[in-house]
Image (tube, coloured by chain):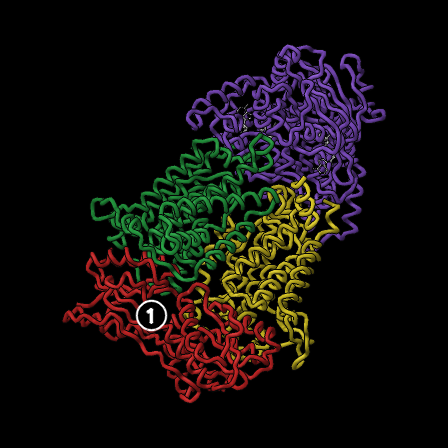
């Protein structure tokens, strides 16, 4: 195990490189970058930019999963918070809009955390409730329409740029650093890992496991809220019907690709975000490839399996394949 | 069949077995020979490689080198199932049963009595009852195993292995959580099986038991074979030297004088403390620098008392005081806040966080006590971990190793370290020496004394009465979930404790079950 | 007395669908009809359940906006046995069930695609033109039909060619993302002459993507899409979109009239009441249309 | 029998819920509605039975919805386009789906990958494959289909017990027997308790894993056939999201997602509870799309909370040893 530590992340980086290389093959201009109106422009930037919502979701999700939980409601929370932000955008200033949206995300997280930590519901069903009802709440806010807005502040959040990078990317980076600082800078990381590793033992060691669980769901809600605001800002409107639809699966996938076990315990924020980037690199590649859309899911399935196999402890990547083949021939 | 009952012929032969986990060389060219009809003790310090040898032989771990012969034929089981098929039945060190299944299913998993492809539930239960009756257990075999104490689970595991009618029976520390009576029953059964020509491998840290039951002894040290001897011709001190590779530093017979502590202040006290259906209300005073032992049979309510005292379970009556001030103990956090510590008896489920490193496990309680915003820096953590790894001689000494990969005894030491690191005023130890080798055992008892001299108050549960007698200043005896007797000073001896345990006090026993 | 009609609506997957639901309510209120709407959340099995429960409640008629064209035979047979007339809204079902419903009030989605294609062909003239296409959800019949219609229309013109086609799932966000990648794949968008989107929402997203890439939709790149939701008119008014084909959200109005006539006088309506697929361009005073459509619940 | 108490509680919750609904809409208390409940949820009952096995064994299977979708398309194309006799088509698809499940189980076991993700990939794969077969919906006109979908036992009061409802009931009962009475069933619980321990106790964990996922996919295949009877068509987008519905059914039925506990009967009751929620909302008929979702969520919460509360109540007096439970 200790021997594995330095190798942590290697599989993910390798996977990313391979997928990038494939993308380069299907789209020769994949690595082209140019500066336009003070912002960088190119497929790589698209990958970062489009990967932002899932990266943000995975930042919260990875903590939830580290406590042995799961949050299916993040897509719905995105929709709710996007809807709130869009409805307030033209009548209120950005601080109010953000406070309202993030506050809503916090409340959603509290609700989930309450069901899991206090009522003791199983995370998957507890959050399924909000997954179903939450989208309804979001649609209730927008009445099923796409609520558009023109507030330049909010639009900037989705489409502006800082130092040539899209604002969403900068926000995601900021959140990664913030989350990292909070989690690793305090004892939170250790206590979360302990809670996920063995909740009973941690409880007996004096860890406030309930508080930990509550906290991670709240954080997950806040991350989802931010992702929702960005998604709304991106299209200058809140699409309660479709915003964040099925993104919970992508977020979970990102976390798992990032090497965090669904059975809780050890987690890595950076690798989870890397997982989100791997997924997006693949998605962008699919879009650039020009294959008919009927193939999208097949490609996705194959890539996901390949990336996971690459990481499997029982399967040391390509070397493993070769060895296996040789053995079966012999 | 004839040759297997010939006591001289080797039944199980292990030659040149090696096994490494990464950089850790757990076994190096170990030989081991088991004859039919003998009871063969496999001994060694914690981490010597006993469990690993057993797991390699039974195919749980793939081996790096070496061969295994069973009845003269080479075997290479690749799974526990295959080993069973070849005739080797094993009870692994950690109770490996399924708490969610019924006792009966646990006993007969994968070999249930069948008719027309359907499990004969009634027949299975009947057989399960009969099987456990041999061990003096009369419990509801249809109830989930998890409802029962570790002891019962352990007996069930043994009963399962014994009933597999194998040629070789391997028992890895089967007696660690059993009390005298049950050990006697187990030994009776082992002798009977040996008489039938079955070869039995027996791992234990209780040397008395080893001398009582075994014919021969094989000793491992640091993954190497030290030697194989006839039990009868191996003096105890010689055995200890073989195991430790040195003399045991100090013999542990002298008990600290109780009167010396009489004047000490009360650290924590509990008045009419109890919980309906859990433990009958009891009074308990714990003084600084004093060891209070809890004695009783399995299921007598010792663990329950410990959990109430620590705050892991909420009392519904009575008053707790710490240093004279009334406190409420609602959760382990409260206990920790008041300077209590608790080493639970089930270290796998309630103690260690297997995936985390030794360092993280050691600092866990201290960190929880300090709170989120006062994180221990990595340097402080390393410092603490190093100190306790050294103090308790935790092996391997790499503090970054996941605790789950340590041997059982070393895991126990890590738990102890976790609480020592919080500098508690009261430490509750539930079976602290379970699975700990002689060397470490002496070490822990020395440590307990030392801690007391520094004013720590200790509440210790142990099924080993000798041990309790050795270090306790007072002994509380429990029966049927009620505190029935308190012995102090000269009154503390094994005979008195046994008398108190056995006395018929049914009148008070059921009070707590209202 | 007052008619009770059960309406099995697909769900609320888009602004257009929301508008159809709210217009249906308005139309029913106008005629004092008690309209019970069951929302199927995009699932056929829910629609079947809903129809069954309408039958169990013995409603006077059932409106069905089928999520998919097949699989209605047995439940519609039950409705027929219970003598409850069924009217299809918005989409048709498989031919085998023709005698199982009273009438279908739908637009022709193949035709919509054709209208869009014809407009493009006419607008481009003889110039060579590379078209990129934003498809609807893979597997959705509307998407397949709108693709088919458009392909038929441009097949007659060798100068028009669909160079890229990818699904945008009928959503703005996906429309934008897909358009971004189209732009990258087509040399910064310089070689794209027109965008065809299976619905307006995707086009609104695509327009943003083009603008962010420094392109001028509506001028450098032609746009044509379908549905005629308010926001596309806003874009048209701003000169960023060129054309849209209307899919009216008022399917319930004609259906209610047909049912009323059938109940009162026994008039059997024609099997298909086709709604108009009207083309709107920048010449049609988009601002005014925008204002008029805004209140319809899109 | 293991797991019955939570199932019993689910039954109580179901009866109470049914009574409450019937109070508001008397029409609900008819054999017709009950018959519809069974028919409409037949495919869900079948997949949920498979899901119960998977979850009790400590796994999860997200691919079932897609397998249903693939099955409907495959069957429709085989019968209508390729001219295969229906029975042959059924056998072929069942073999195919069983093999698919076995493959997922093998990957999970051999490479030690989390089932959630492997079956998620399986979900993409099966759905993607059905797109490749056909993106259009394909009506099935074979005579067996009309025969089967017209077949129904009349119940007193006008209700119909249809063929597919009967298939579902048979599978649920068969599943319950398989789980509770056979060695296979005991091993499923064992795996859910702990894979390593089960393996140490001699259970062939790898084979079991493969068999369990095979069973789940096989049942999803059967559910797909039933779905194709239900709609007389094959459609690549059918049964989207059914995996979550069936997981919810299993959990509402008192099964722990961590594995090791639960029952098929409870799962069946969970399916009925979900059907009841749907029926109630349909009968109400005034709910907009969003209120439908919110109401579904609220009712889901109410049922789960009620069930959880009752379970906690039921446990309280029995709980003896705090050290060893849970
Ligand atoms: N799965 C594993 N991975 C890595 N190292 C292991 C593993 N299992 C055991 N070890 C290491 O192998 C060595 C031998 O451990 P083993 O469990 O065999 O000791 P033991 O003699 O049974 O001790 P105890 O008396 O404490 O049970 C120890 O150093 C332990 O840390
Ligand atoms: N011989 C037995 N027969 C039936 N039930 C028993 C027996 N021994 C223990 N139990 C049950 O097991 C449960 C757990 O006992 P537990 O181990 O917590 O008691 P204890 O006093 O702490 O003993 P120890 O610490 O030695 O294990 C009790 O509820 C008791 O009812
Ligand atoms: Mg050991
Ligand atoms: Mg105990």
Residue pictured at 44% horizontal, 22% vertical? B123
Left or right position of C166 against B219: left
- Horizontal and vertical percent position of residue A82: 51, 69
Count the labels in the image.
Answer: 1
Residue pictured at 66% horizontal, 57% vertical? A15
Identify the chain drawn in red: C
Q: Is residue A12 among the parts visible in the rendering? A: yes
Q: Nearer the viewer, residue A315 or B247?
A: A315
Q: Secondary structure at mark 1?
A: strand
Residue pictured at 31% horizontal, 76% vertical? C275
What chain does badge 1 belong to? Answer: C
> Within 10 angstroms of label 1, few (less than 14), some, or many (20 or more) residues?
many
- Horizontal and vertical percent position of residue B215: 72, 14
Left or right position of B254 against A262: right
Q: Residue furthest left?
A: C265
**Where does label 1 land, which residue?**
C90
Q: Quarter holding the N terminus of chain D?
A: top left
Q: Chain B hue?
A: purple
Left or right position of C286 against A2: left
- Horizontal and vertical percent position of residue D202: 57, 30
Location of residue A164 by image quarter: bottom right
Q: Is residue B322 above or below residue B378?
A: above
Identify the chain drawn in yellow: A
Q: Chain D hue?
A: green
- Horizontal and vertical percent position of residue B477: 62, 24
Q: Is residue B109 among the parts visible in the rendering? A: no
């Amino acid at each position: 195990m200790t021997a594995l530590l330095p190798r942590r992340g290697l599989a993910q980086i390798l996977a990313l490189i391979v997928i990038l290389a494939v993308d380069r093959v299907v789209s020769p201009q994949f690595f082209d970058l140019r500066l336009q109106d003070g912002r960088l422009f190119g497929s790589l930037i698209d990958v970062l930019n489009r990967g932002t919502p899932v990266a943000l979701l995975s930042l919260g999700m990875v903590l939830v999963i580290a406590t042995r939980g799961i949050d299916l409601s993040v897509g719905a929370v995105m929709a709710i918070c996007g809807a709130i932000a869009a409805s307030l955008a033209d009548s209120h200033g950005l601080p109010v809009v953000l406070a309202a949206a993030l506050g809503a995300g916090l409340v959603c997280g509290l609700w989930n955390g309450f069901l899991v930590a206090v009522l003791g519901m199983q995370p998957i069903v507890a959050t399924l409730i909000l997954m179903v009802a939450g989208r309804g709440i979001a649609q209730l806010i927008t009445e099923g329409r796409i609520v558009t807005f023109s507030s330049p502040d909010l639009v900037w959040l989705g489409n502006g740029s800082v130092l040539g990078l899209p604002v969403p990317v900068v926000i995601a980076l900021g959140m990664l650093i913030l989350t990292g600082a909070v989690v690793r800078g305090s004892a939170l990381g250790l206590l979360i890992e302990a809670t996920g590793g063995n909740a009973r033992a941690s409880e007996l060691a004096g860890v406030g496991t309930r508080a930990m669980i509550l906290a991670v769901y709240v954080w997950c809600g806040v991350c989802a809220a931010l992702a929702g605001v960005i998604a709304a800002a991106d299209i200058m409107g809140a699409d309660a019907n479709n915003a964040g639809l099925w993104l919970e699966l992508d977020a979970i996938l990102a976390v798992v690709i990032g090497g965090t076990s669904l059975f809780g315990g050890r987690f890595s924020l950076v690798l989870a975000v890397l997982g989100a980037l791997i997924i997006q690199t693949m998605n962008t590649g699919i879009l650039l490839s020009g294959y008919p859309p009927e193939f999208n899911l097949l490609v996705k399935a194959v890539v996901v399996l390949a990336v996971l196999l690459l990481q499997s402890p029982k399967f040391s990547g390509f070397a493993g394949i070769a060895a296996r083949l040789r053995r079966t021939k012999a | 069949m004839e040759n297997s009952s010939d006591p001289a012929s080797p039944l199980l032969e292990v030659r040149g077995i090696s096994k490494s986990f990464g950089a850790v060389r757990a076994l190096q060219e170990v030989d081991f020979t088991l004859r039919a009809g003998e009871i063969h003790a496999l001994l060694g310090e914690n981490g010597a490689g006993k469990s690993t040898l057993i797991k390699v032989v039974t195919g749980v771990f793939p081996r790096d080198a070496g061969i295994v012969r069973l009845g003269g034929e080479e075997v290479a089981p690749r799974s526990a199932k295959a080993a069973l098929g070849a005739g080797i039945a094993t009870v692994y060190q950690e109770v490996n049963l399924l708490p969610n299944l019924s006792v009966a299913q646990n006993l007969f998993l994968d070999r249930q009595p069948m008719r027309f492809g359907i499990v004969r539930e009634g027949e299975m239960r009947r057989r399960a009852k009969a099987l456990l009756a041999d061990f003096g257990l009369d419990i509801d075999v249809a109830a989930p195993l998890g409802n029962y104490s570790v002891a019962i689970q352990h007996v069930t595991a043994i009963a399962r292995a014994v009933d597999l009618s194998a040629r070789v029976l391997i028992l890895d520390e089967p007696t660690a959580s059993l009390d005298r009576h049950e050990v006697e029953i187990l030994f009776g059964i082992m002798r009977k099986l040996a008489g039938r020509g079955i070869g039995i491998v027996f791992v234990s840290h209780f040397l008395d038991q080893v001398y009582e039951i075994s014919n021969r002894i094989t000793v491992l040290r640091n993954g190497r074979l030290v030697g194989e001897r006839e039990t009868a011709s191996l003096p105890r001190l010689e055995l200890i030297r073989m195991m430790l590779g040195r003399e045991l530093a100090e013999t542990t017979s002298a008990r600290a004088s109780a009167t010396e502590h009489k004047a000490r202040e009360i650290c924590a006290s509990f008045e009419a403390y109890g919980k309906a259906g859990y433990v009958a209300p009891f009074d308990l005073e714990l003084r600084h620098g004093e060891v209070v032992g809890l004695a009783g049979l399995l299921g007598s309510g010792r663990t329950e008392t410990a959990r109430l005292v620590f705050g892991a379970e909420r009392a519904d009556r009575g008053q707790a005081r710490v240093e004279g001030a009334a406190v409420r103990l609602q959760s382990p956090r409260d206990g920790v806040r008041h300077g209590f510590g608790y080493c639970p008896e089930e270290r796998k489920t309630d103690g260690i966080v297997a995936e985390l490193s030794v360092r993280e496990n050691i600092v866990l309680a201290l960190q929880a006590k300090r709170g989120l915003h006062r994180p221990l820096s990595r340097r402080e953590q390393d410092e603490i971990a190093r100190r306790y790894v050294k103090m308790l001689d935790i092996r391997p000494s790499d503090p970054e190793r996941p605790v789950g990969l340590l041997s059982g005894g070393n895991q126990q030491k890590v738990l102890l370290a976790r609480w020592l690191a919080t500098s508690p005023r009261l430490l509750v130890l539930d079976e602290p020496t379970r699975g700990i080798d002689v060397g470490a055992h002496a070490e822990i008892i020395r440590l307990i004394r030392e801690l007391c001299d520094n004013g720590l108050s200790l509440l210790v549960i142990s099924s080993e009465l000798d041990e309790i007698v050795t270090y306790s200043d007072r002994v509380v005896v429990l029966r049927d979930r009620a505190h029935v007797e308190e012995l102090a000073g000269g009154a503390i001896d094994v005979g008195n404790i046994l008398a108190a345990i056995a006395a018929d006090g049914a009148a008070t026993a059921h009070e707590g079950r209202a | 007395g007052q008619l009770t009609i059960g309406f099995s609506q697909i769900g609320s997957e888009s602004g257009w669908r929301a508008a159809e639901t709210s217009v249906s309510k308005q139309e029913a209120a106008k005629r004092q009809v008690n309209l019970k709407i069951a929302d199927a959340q995009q699932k056929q099995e829910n629609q079947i359940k809903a129809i069954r429960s309408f039958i169990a409640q013995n409603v006077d008629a059932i409106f069905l906006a089928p999520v998919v064209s097949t699989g209605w035979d047995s439940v519609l047979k039950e409705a027929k046995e219970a003598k409850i007339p069924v009217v299809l809204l918005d989409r048709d079902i498989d031919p085998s069930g023709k005698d199982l419903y009273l009438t279908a009030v739908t637009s022709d989605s193949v035709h919509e695609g054709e209208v869009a294609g014809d407009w493009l062909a006419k607008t481009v003239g003889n110039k060579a033109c590379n078209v990129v296409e934003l498809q609807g959800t893979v597997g959705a019949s509307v998407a397949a039909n709108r693709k088919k219609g458009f392909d038929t229309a441009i097949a007659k013109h060798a100068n028009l060619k669909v160079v890229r086609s990818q699904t945008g799932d009928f959503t703005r966000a996906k429309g934008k993302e897909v358009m971004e990648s189209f732009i990258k794949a087509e040399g910064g968008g310089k070689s794209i002459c027109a965008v065809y989107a299976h619905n307006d929402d995707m086009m609104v997203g695509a327009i943003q993507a083009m603008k962010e890439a420094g392109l001028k939709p509506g001028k450098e790149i032609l746009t044509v899409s379908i549905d005629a939701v308010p926001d596309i008119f806003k874009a048209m008014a701003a000169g960023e979109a060129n054309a849209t084909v209307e899919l009216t959200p008022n399917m319930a109005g004609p259906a209610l009239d047909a049912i009323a006539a059938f109940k009162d006088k026994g008039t059997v309506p024609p099997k298909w009441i086709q709604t108009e697929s009207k083309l709107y361009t920048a010449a049609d005073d988009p601002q005014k249309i925008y204002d008029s459509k805004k209140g319809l619940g899109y | 029998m293991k797991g019955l108490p939570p199932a019993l509680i689910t039954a109580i919750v179901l009866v109470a819920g049914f009574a409450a609904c019937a109070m508001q809409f008397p029409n609900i208390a008819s054999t017709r509605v009950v018959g519809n409940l069974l028919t409409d949820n037949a495919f869900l009952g079948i997949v949920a039975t498979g899901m119960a096995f998977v979850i009790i064994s400590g796994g999860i299977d997200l691919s079932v919805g897609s397998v249903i979708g693939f099955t409907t398309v495959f069957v429709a194309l085989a019968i209508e386009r390729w001219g295969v006799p229906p029975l042959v088509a059924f056998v072929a698809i069942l073999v195919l789906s069983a093999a698919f499940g076995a493959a997922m189980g093998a990957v999970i076991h051999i490479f030690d990958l989390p089932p959630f993700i492997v079956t998620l990939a399986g979900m993409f794969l099966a759905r993607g494959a059905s797109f490749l077969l056909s993106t259009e919906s394909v009506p099935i006109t074979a005579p067996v289909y009309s025969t089967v979908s017209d077949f129904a036992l009349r119940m007193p009061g006008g209700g119909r017990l249809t063929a597919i409802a009967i298939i579902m009931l048979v599978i649920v009962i068969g599943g319950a027997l398989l789980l509770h009475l056979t060695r296979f069933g005991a091993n499923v619980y064992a795996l859910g308790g702990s894979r390593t321990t089960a393996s140490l106790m001699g259970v062939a964990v790898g084979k079991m894993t493969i068999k369990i996922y095979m069973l789940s996919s096989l049942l999803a295949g059967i559910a797909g056939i039933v779905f194709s009877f239900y709609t007389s068509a094959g459609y690549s987008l059918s049964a989207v999201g059914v995996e979550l519905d069936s997981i919810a059914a299993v959990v509402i039925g008192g099964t722990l997602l961590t594995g090791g506990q639960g029952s098929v009967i409870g799962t069946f009751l969970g399916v009925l509870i979900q059907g009841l929620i749907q029926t109630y909302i349909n009968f109400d008929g005034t709910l907009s799309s969003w209120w439908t979702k919110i109401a579904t969520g609220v009712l889901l919460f109410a049922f789960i909370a009620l069930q959880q509360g009752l379970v906690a109540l039921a446990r309280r007096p029995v709980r003896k040893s705090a050290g060893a439970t849970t």
